[in-house]
């Protein structure tokens, strides 16, 4: 018997418009995986759809059918071996023909396919592989038309999208263009073997004292009848920790159980090392190795704690028994053309989450089950993954074939992903229960008979409460399953006492002031957001004419897909800042508003973590973008951070100090200033040990930079581990005694180092005169290793000092408030002797 052999089919493809029968229409495909837009771009048949209005000129592509063709040589195959044509993903309606015979038809982009072509490839020599990709846009409409009784309620994209298992954002979303890709979007190859390891997975148990773990490892074998042996091995940093050889049983599975003493556990970053063990399986026929597979696994326990408490029912994560406040963000596909994203780019994204102190990313349900390299980066760097199943913002139909396809999709993807220690929860969908509510669809939580659900006008409950939990229970029994985001015990999805919550009454909905975010949270805030313009250079990347470089130009509006975005941006502008018309200042102001909003959200909710885990986490909407546009992203398509990225990183420090005066709504009080303001001061800690620190609070005039009131100092504050330490709960500023507008500036020292700062400003900013601040930014040191130190000081308080983002240059902090008597040092890397521009509010 011979070893499994893989023959890549990534080269030698050509493609054409399926309907074009003329000679010479085949165009070369540089390489697959690819999608048709990329291949058209490579052949100069399409202009970059990310530029200007080109998305509209690319519409014709969405409505076409495409044929891909490959002529390949039959690989060598020993007698008795099997030849498989393996597709890891086809986008989406694909008819695969081998030498003219249909060998596969598929209609679900989220599935892999393995076609036995041993017989079809009997003849030596050349064979022709052809794939017809039918038009998903038209097929979706057709399918919708076949079920007129179904209530096609949805938001974002054409509702017909719900009839097709293809990334839903391809139909356009409120942050992305309509680009209906088609193509061989994941790996394609031939495999020749007699037997192979079809799957390799583990079940892990850890003793309560963490001194011991059992790792049960399983290898599933697929192949010709015979007797096989499998050697399973566990290693740590290249050194073998345990191994065992066993025979493959009648059920085609090899099982071993390893007892590991003093295991190195996997931790999210900030809590310990994200240790990974190597797991490998080697399959033999007793003599020769037939196949070898290796994966990285983690030894860890992940739980969602839902316990009744004084606020309702908790919802927070525990890793290895440690409560973790999940500060992080929601993740959308990082490109409209998925095959543009390389493993290196995925890695950079996850690195930027870590540098931004985010411990959780939520793979949102309108995108894709991500590439393996995304999850591997999360495993390696210690970022927890909240994994939605791919359903979003709609009332999905449930034809038997569709349900069947969905079960296969869930099974395939959970099997593919279950070894990743980073994945700590599977969630049924994004906002489908909100669609049910908003459209008055039937959902009787007390009715536990799934067959009845299918007969209601919200049949997809069957998917979220039967199919998906069954699949997770069978394949990843130790991973928590939650039916939807948001969802909580069948209560209304806005219920703040149970489950998770999407808080969109800032920006969407009732358009509350962001200053009150903390009062709007639930037990776990899995979405909330505020739009901001991206970096000027990012905007310049899609603007073709100099004349369009103004804030509300047609092409800029075209790159903002959110309903009513002008009104909403205008609202938050008008309420908070002095309006500007030049593009650069306008960009900056939208960014200040976003940074402030996100800061208010995280700061308040993290404080609640210390109060019986009232808030278990906050995931902002959204980390990233799929094209250069204007959206809620805090890092743009080109990976350029917006100021909010730094503001969030600051409130998520292991030790963060919070100072905040109570909200006084200037709009509803006719701009009459308050007579008194309550304020509070606290420390949030994610450290697992208590520490002592010194706290200082100063009251500094915005106008003069002088202290208007005696500062307060606490010399020996005991800071609680993994919680909140209140220092002041409700002291009062009497504005008759202290009439001058002033900031409250707090600092925290631990072991003589300043570890945290926070500044509370009188709201709104527009009433403050922020001219002539006396800011001084000095280059204090230029290290030989291209490292610059900037010393930043000021005579009067400065709001939101933002350093220019330049590709290749990294700043240690930005979007900072600077107050007199508190010089701050910024480390800049990659500047090569140059200087960085900066901006602050009112400059
Ligand atoms: C949320 C998301 C997305 C959407 C975002 C902004 O609720 O789930 O569907 O892009 O709002 O509107």
Image (spheres, rainbow, N blue to C red):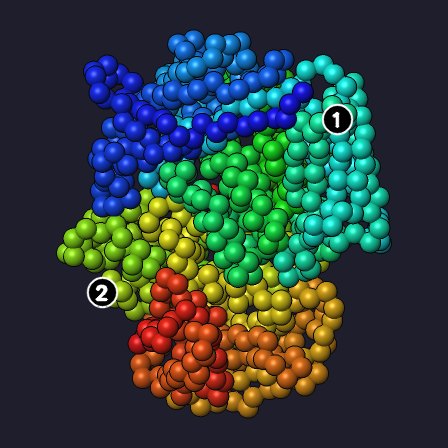
Count residues near mark 2 (Cα–Cα under 10 Å), then give few for <14, some for 14-19, many for 20+: few
Q: Place residue 257 in its image quadrant.
A: top right
Q: Quadrant of the C terminus?
A: bottom left
Pick the residue in front: 530 or 477. Answer: 477
Q: Is residue 273 left or right of residue 604?
A: right
Residue 744 tag number: none
Against 113, is 100 above or below?
above
**Residue pictured at 66% horizontal, 64% vertical:** 686
Nearest to the eye among marks 2 and 1: give it.
1
Query: Dividing the image into four equal quarters, which quarter contains ligand 1?
Result: top left
Q: Position of residue 409 (x, y in %)?
A: 56, 26
User: Residue 144, percent across and down?
Assistant: 40, 19
Asked whether disc 2 touches disc 1, contact meaning CB atoms under 8 Å apart, the reply is: no
Residue receiving disc 2: 582
Q: Secondary structure at mark 2?
A: loop
Q: Nearer the viewer, residue 380 or 280?
A: 280
* Image position of 438 (left or right of 778): right
For image coordinates 73% across by 37% down, the residue present is 202
Quadrant in the picture for residue 195: top right
Image quadrant of residue 445? top right
Residue 809 point in image, percent of width and height:
40, 66
Residue position marked by numbered label 1 in the rendering: 287
Q: Report helix, strand or loop for mark 1.
A: loop
Q: Nearer the viewer, residue 416 or 390?
A: 416
Disc 2 versus disc 1: distance between alpha carbons? 74 Å
- Which residue occupies the foreground of this view, 547 or 488? 547
In this orientation, does residue 379 appear?
Answer: yes
Q: In which quadrant of the rendered image does the N terminus lie? A: top right
Position in image of residue 457 (x %, y %): 51, 22
């Amino acid at each position: 018997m011979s070893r499994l052999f893989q023959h890549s089919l990534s080269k030698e493809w050509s493609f054409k418009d399926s309907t074009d029968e003329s000679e010479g229409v085949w165009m070369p495909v540089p390489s697959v995986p690819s999608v048709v837009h990329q291949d058209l771009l490579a052949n100069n048949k399409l202009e970059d759809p990310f530029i200007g209005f080109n998305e509209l000129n690319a519409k014709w592509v969405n409505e076409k059918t495409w044929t891909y063709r490959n002529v390949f040589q039959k690989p060598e195959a020993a007698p008795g071996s099997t030849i498989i044509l393996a597709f890891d993903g086809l986008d989406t309606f694909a008819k695969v023909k081998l030498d003219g015979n249909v060998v596969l038809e598929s209609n679900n982009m989220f599935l892999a396919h393995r076609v036995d072509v041993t017989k079809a490839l009997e003849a030596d020599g050349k064979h022709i592989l052809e794939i017809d990709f039918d038009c998903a846009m038209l097929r979706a409409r057709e399918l919708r038309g076949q079920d007129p009784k179904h209530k096609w309620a949805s938001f974002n994209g054409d509702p017909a999208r719900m009839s097709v298992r293809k990334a839903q954002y391809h139909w356009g979303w409120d942050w992305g263009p309509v680009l209906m890709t088609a193509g061989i979007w994941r790996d394609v190859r031939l495999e020749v073997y007699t037997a192979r390891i079809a799957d390799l997975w583990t079940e892990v148990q850890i003793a309560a004292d963490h001194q011991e773990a059992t790792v049960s490892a399983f290898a599933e074998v697929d192949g010709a009848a015979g007797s096989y042996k499998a050697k399973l091995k566990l290693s740590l940093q290249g050194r073998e920790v345990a191994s065992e050889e066993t025979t493959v049983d009648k059920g085609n599975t090899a099982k071993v159980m390893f007892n590991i003493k003093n295991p190195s556990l996997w931790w999210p970053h900030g809590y310990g090392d994200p240790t990974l063990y190597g797991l490998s399986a080697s399959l033999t026929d007793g003599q020769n190795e037939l196949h070898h597979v290796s994966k990285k696994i983690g030894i860890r326990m992940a739980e969602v704690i839902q316990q009744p408490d004084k606020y309702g029912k908790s919802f927070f994560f525990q890793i290895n028994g440690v409560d973790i406040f999940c500060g992080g963000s929601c993740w959308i596909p990082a490109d409209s053309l998925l095959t543009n994203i390389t493993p290196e780019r995925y890695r950079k994204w996850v690195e930027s989450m870590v540098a931004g102190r985010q411990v959780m990313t939520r793979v949102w349900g309108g995108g894709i089950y991500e590439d393996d390299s995304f999850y591997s980066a999360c495993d390696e760097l210690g970022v927890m993954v909240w994994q939605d199943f791919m359903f979003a913002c709609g009332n999905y139909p449930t034809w038997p074939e569709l349900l069947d396809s969905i079960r296969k999709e869930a099974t395939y993807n959970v099997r593919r992903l279950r070894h990743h220690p980073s994945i700590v929860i599977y969630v049924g969908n994004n906002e489908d229960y909100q669609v049910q509510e908003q459209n008055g669809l039937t959902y009787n939580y007390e009715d536990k008979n799934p067959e009845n659900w299918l007969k209601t006008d919200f049949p997809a409950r069957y998917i979220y409460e039967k199919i998906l939990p069954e699949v997770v229970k069978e394949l990843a029994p130790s991973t928590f399953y939650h039916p939807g985001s948001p969802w909580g015990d069948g209560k209304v999805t806005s219920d703040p006492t149970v489950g998770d919550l999407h808080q969109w009454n800032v920006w969407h909905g009732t358009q509350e002031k962001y200053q009150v975010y903390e009062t709007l949270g639930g037990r776990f805030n899995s979405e909330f957001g505020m739009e901001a313009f991206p970096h000027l250079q990012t905007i310049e990347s899609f603007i073709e004419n100099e004349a369009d470089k103004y804030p509300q130009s047609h092409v800029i509006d075209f790159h903002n897909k959110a309903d009513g975005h002008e009104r909403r941006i205008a609202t938050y502008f008008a309420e908070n800042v002095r309006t500007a018309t030049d593009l650069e200042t306008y960009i900056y102001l939208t960014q200040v508003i976003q940074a402030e909003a996100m800061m208010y959200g995280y700061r308040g909710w993290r404080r609640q973590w210390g109060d019986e885990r009232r808030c278990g986490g906050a995931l902002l909407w959204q980390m990233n973008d799929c094209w250069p546009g204007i959206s809620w992203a805090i890092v743009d398509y080109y990976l350029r951070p917006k100021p909010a990225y730094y503001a969030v990183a600051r409130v998520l420090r292991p030790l963060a100090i919070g100072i905040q005066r109570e909200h006084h709504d200037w709009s509803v009080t006719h701009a009459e200033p308050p007579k008194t303001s309550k304020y509070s001061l606290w420390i949030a800690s994610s450290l697992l040990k208590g520490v002592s620190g010194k706290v200082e609070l100063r009251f500094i005039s915005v106008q003069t930079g002088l202290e208007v009131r005696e500062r307060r100092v606490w010399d020996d504050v005991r800071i609680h581990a993994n919680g909140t330490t209140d220092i002041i709960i409700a002291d009062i500023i009497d504005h008759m005694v202290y009439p001058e507008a002033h900031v409250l500036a707090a600092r925290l020292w631990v072991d003589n180092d300043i570890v945290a700062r926070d500044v509370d400003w009188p709201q709104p900013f527009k009433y403050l005169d922020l001219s002539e601040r006396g800011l001084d930014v000095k280059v204090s040191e230029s290290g030989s290793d291209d490292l610059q130190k900037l010393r930043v000081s000021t005579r009067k308080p400065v709001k939101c000092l933002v350093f220019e983002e330049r590709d290749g240059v990294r700043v240690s902090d930005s979007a900072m408030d600077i107050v007199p008597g508190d010089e701050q040092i910024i480390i800049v890397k990659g500047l090569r002797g140059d200087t960085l521009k900066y901006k602050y509010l009112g400059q």
